[in-house]
Structure formats: C-alpha cells, structure tokens
Amino acid sequence: MAEAAKPPKLLYKYRAFSPRLLDMLVADELYYSDPRDFNDPLDCRPSLDVDLSNDELELVLSRLRERRVLAEMQAAAKSLKYRGPKTIDHIARHSQKEASQLLQEIRYHATDPSYEGDDPLRWLLRQYLEEELLRRYDRGIVSFGSRATCPLMWSHYGDQHNGICAAYSIPPDAKPNLHKISYGGSRKVLASEVAVMDSDSEARRRVDNAVLLRKAASWGYEREWRLIGKRGAQDSPLELEEVIFGIRCKSTVKFTIVQALTNRRRPVRFFEMREVSGTFRLKKYVLDAAELAASLPRRSRLVYEMFENLE
C-alpha cells in the first residue's frame, strides 16, 4: 500500500436512515463493501499495460489462474476436512490443468477472424489478466470523508440532509488498515509489475495503490480514506465519537438514534447541521436532546383525553 499518511483526528461516514445505519451505530458494525458495487465503475478497476511479450503474458496469466484455483480448492478442502497427500496432489494437478485449459481456450479464440486488430491473442491475454488481477483483490472497503461540512457529501451520501454523519476516532491498532485515496493520474498497471508482485514488495505496493487507492480527479471533493478488510459486516475497529444530523433529518429519527445510544458505555456527542446565514457553508451545532425528549414519544390519543370531561 501507499506510504502511511497521517489521518485526520476524526473520519466521517455519511448515511441515510436504514437498518444498516442502526447496525452501524447500535451494534458498532461497519459494512465492508464489494468494490464491484461502487457507484463509479472505474473505481478499483485498473487498466493493464501489457509491457511483456505474449509468451511472458501467458506465463503470468497461467500463474495467477493456478494460484487462485489452488487457494479456492484448499479452502474448500479445509471446510470439508479433507486432508492427506492424495488431496494435496489432486488439488495441485487440478489447478495446473485449469490454467493450461484456459491458455488453450484463449489461443483458440484468438484465431477467430472476426477479431479486429493486429494481435487478437495479445488483446485477449490482457482482458483475462485484468480479470484475474481483480479477482485477487477480494477485499471489502469502507469509505470515509475527512470533514463533516461538505455540502456535496451530504447530498450524495447523507440522503440529501435527511440522514446522518457519524464521526469516528482512530485507535492506533486500526491505522495500518486505513489508507488515503489519491485522485487523478493514470489507471495503468504494468504487466511486468504484476508478474513480480509476489516477490517484489515495491512492485506489490505500486499495484495495490493503482487497484485500491486511486480515483478520478473529479471525486477529489470526497477527501476519502478507506478501511480495507474482509467483505461484509464486521466489528468496527474505530471509535464512534459523534452523530451529526442533517438539516432535513426528522425529529423522530433524531429521537430514535439518541435514545438508542443513550446507555452506550462510551458516550457519544450529538450535533445537528445548520446553514451559515447568507452563505453556502454549513456548521454543526450541539443538539438539544432535552428538547427532543420533552415532545417525543407522543400519543395521538392525548388530545382526545384533554376533552373527555367536557361531555
């Protein structure tokens, strides 16, 4: 990964009100998303620069496919509690066979006259290498911003101010898995670096950065930091410090979240976002939780009960 940059004091997660938000706040979970589900299809999708000969590209692709199949079959054998030299030998032979069959199929398809271009084999090898490279990166990502007052972040990720923004502090043991995004530059990854990434730490760092930590310049307003880990819902390695409610966030949502976090062992501070008069800027203010509690929850029958003795 990139050389560690110093993270800000707090990181911010914008979200709409949903069951997943309650899991995030009440159960202290974070959801590590599959990059294929991101709203930007170019995010985590580098473009391979094939700076090797076709024979060398075939060798790299064969090695990537063989290792992936080997890892998948070893995981399956472990779950089924299959052990022993016969199992190990079978897995190794099957992995080699899969890689060999893939290359045979690619060479066959490259003879299709409908392919345009001077070297269909090279084009196909690049396509399959990009696919195999991405399948190596089976990690999940949690994205954060570095400020709570960005209007675009509230509009795009905070449900147009109907949602919330959660602020997290960063314990020392969480910092190694936290990475800063770079914006702009090239999506290119050299095939020659993919070829040696398992033995050359600098090549691995450059490939990792290109795949996981680079986005288009137009996304720069996000000032994004990423946690990288196992996909799906995981215990949060960060500490929840604040919940900030959007300008349009309903009182019932505020009340629900405040009540849900009232008895939290580590206290959480509550704020609400407001406009700065005469400007387009936003500022957070301390939420008056006592005022919320004075009016909520309420009963619709109460108004009728006030008039019961008039009959």
Image: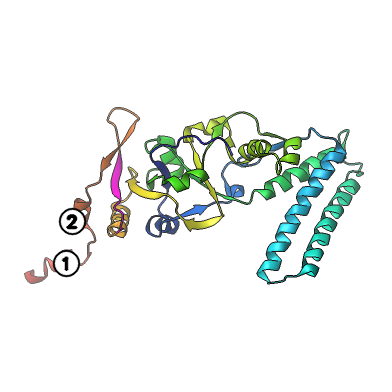
Q: Nearer the viewer, residue 60 or 142?
A: 60
Q: Which residue is mark 2?
A: 294
Query: In the rendered image, which quarter contains the N terminus?
Result: top right
Q: Is residue 265 magenta?
A: yes
> What is the x, y in percent for residue 8?
41, 36
Report how far apart the C-alphas of labels 2 and 1 lie in the structure.
Answer: 20 Å
Viewer-proximal residue among 174 and 181: 174
Position of residue 27 relative to residue 283, above or below, is below
Q: Which residue is mark 1?
A: 304
Residue sitting at x 63%, y 51%: 138
> Does the rendering let one see residue 124?
no
Horizontal placement of 82 versus 36: left or right?
right
> Measuring 46% from the left and 48% from the top, which residue is drawn there?
173
- Residue at (56% x, 31% y) in the render: 183
The magenta region covers 264-273
Element at badge 2?
Answer: helix
Magenta stretch: residue 189 in it?
no
Left or right: residue 18 compared with residue 186 = left
Res 294 → quadrant: bottom left
